Amino acid sequence: MATVFLAGGAGYIGSHTAVELLEAGYEVIAADNFCNSSPESVRRAEQITGKTIRLYDADIRDTRRLAGIFQENRIDAVIHFAGLKAVGESAEKPLLYYRNNIDTTLSLLETMQQFGVKHVIFSSSATVYGSENPIPYTETMRRGVCSNPYGWTKAMTEQILEDAAKADPSLSVVLLRYFNPIGAHPSGMIGEDPCGIPNNLMPYITQVAVGKRECLTVFGNDYPTPDGTCRRDYIHVTDLAKGHVKATDYVLQHTGVEAVNLGTGTPYSVLEIVEAFERVNGVKIAYRFGPRRAGDIPEFYANADKARELLHWTAEKTLDDMCRDAWNWQKQNPNGFRDSE
Ligand code: NAD
Ligand code: WQD
């Protein structure tokens, strides 16, 4: 079976993808500098599957280090998760974001070229559609104007990969545009483990539920949506991870570039998420309304047809599954992976 190299594989989505790839029969190798993760996530992925993952403590920007890894292993495909992802921080430290997110891409592509590795999947984002495109977002739409440097790193990386594939027709690239991944592996052994105050909605809710934060601030209740709060396409991280397995099957068999949305196609509002979390888990989430957050748009969700047609993948889990599994992970690991380090 083919061997897949996960750059940034110790992170939230990488660790869930490792589990699904192993369960589908792929061999998995990972490298991470743990700037936003812990090696414990990879150990747990091994425990869940009963299989081993060769894990390197390495900065993906370091081409010498990468060459060593590619020399030691016969790598068939690369999944590029390695990036910084905090939208607000990217506006404060744009150079850090451009340096990290673009350099990881260039180093990976150069090393792939050196070792003749032709298959790559990139963690892109719905953010590349910008705010001007109509919803639902469809892959035939042009990339839009991003509202922050993080988003631009995703748009630029897509462009770099497209140019690389144009220059080398034997290259095979899948750009996976994630919508809003939430939830955790149903075992509760791996999940999202943000450092400091969570930027994203679901980890904030679970930290309120576990008593680490007092109250959720709902950013704005005067949007042109049914209940006035923003609507997003939340997707269970295990569904998302399975989408990577299908994308790996695909990328190994084709050449050229395909952008594919990974979403459910159904949006939920902030208040619907809070309501579902409370109902499914029998806990109360204190919340108050605050001002809008800069850069938020009222609503976006995926047209998920292409993923179904091209990758034979559809999200299967419900919002209740997402809420239950997010809470199961947080309850079992109130301090994330830190207790086990
Ligand atoms: P994450 O922070 O948990 O995972 C990213 C991993 O990359 C971390 O383990 C981090 O330590 C590692 N990393 C960063 N820079 C590195 C470097 N220079 N060398 C080695 N390792 C490095 O984030 P995630 O949620 O798992 O996201 C994975 C990818 O998906 C990211 O590229 C992110 O931008 C993208 N994405 C995430 C979301 C989301 O909502 N979580 C949505 C769309 C796209
Ligand atoms: C969801 C909704 C907030 C926190 C971000 C990135 C996007 C992609 C996914 C990487 C919004 C509201 C949130 C809180 C709130 N990431 N909210 N109170 O902004 O849709 O997408 O993550 O690529 O690029 O922008 O996700 O979870 O931050 O917010 O009311 O404390 O929850 O306003 O409506 P977002 P999110």
Image (tube, rainbow, N blue to C red):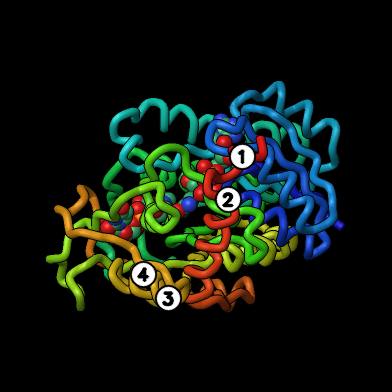
Q: Nearer the viewer, residue 307 or 290?
A: 290
Q: Quadrant of residue 265?
A: bottom left
Task: Check if mark 1's residue and mark 3's residue have beta carbons within 8 Å.
Answer: no
Residue 257 got which mark?
Answer: none
Label 3 neighbourhood size at 10 Å, few (<14), some (14-19), many (20+)? many
Q: Give the image location of residue 311, x and y in percent.
A: 63, 71
Distance from the alpha carbon under mark 1 to that under mark 2: 8 Å
Using the numbered discs, state the Cα–Cα distance from disc 2 to disc 3 in whole angstroms: 30 Å
Instruction: Pick whichever of labels 1 and 3 is earlier in the sequence.
Output: 3
Residue 139 can be seen, yes or no: yes
Please rate how many residues cluster around mark 2, counting C-alpha atoms within 10 Å: few if below 14, some from 14 to 19, many from 20. Answer: some
How far apart marks 1 and 4 lie (CA) works out to 28 Å
Q: Residue at x 78, y 50 (%)?
A: 46
Which residue corresponds to mark 1?
339
Amino acid type of the residue that numbered disc 1 sits on in the rendered structure: Asp
Q: Which is in the foreground here, disc 2 or disc 3?
A: 2
Q: Determine whether 73 is above or below 158 in the image.
A: above
* Circle 1 residues within 10 Å: few <14, some 14–19, many ≥20: few
Q: CA distance from mark 1 to mark 3?
A: 37 Å
Residue 265's mark? 3
Q: Nearer the viewer, mark 1 or mark 3?
A: 1
* Depth order, front residue of 261/279: 279
Mark 2 element type: loop
- In the picture, measured across the screen, residue 153 lies left or right of residue 322, that is left
First in sequence: mark 1 vs mark 4: 4
Distance from label 2 to label 4 (Cα)? 21 Å
Label drawn at residue 333 = 2
Dot 1 or dot 2, earlier in sequence: 2
Name which residue type carries label 3: Gly
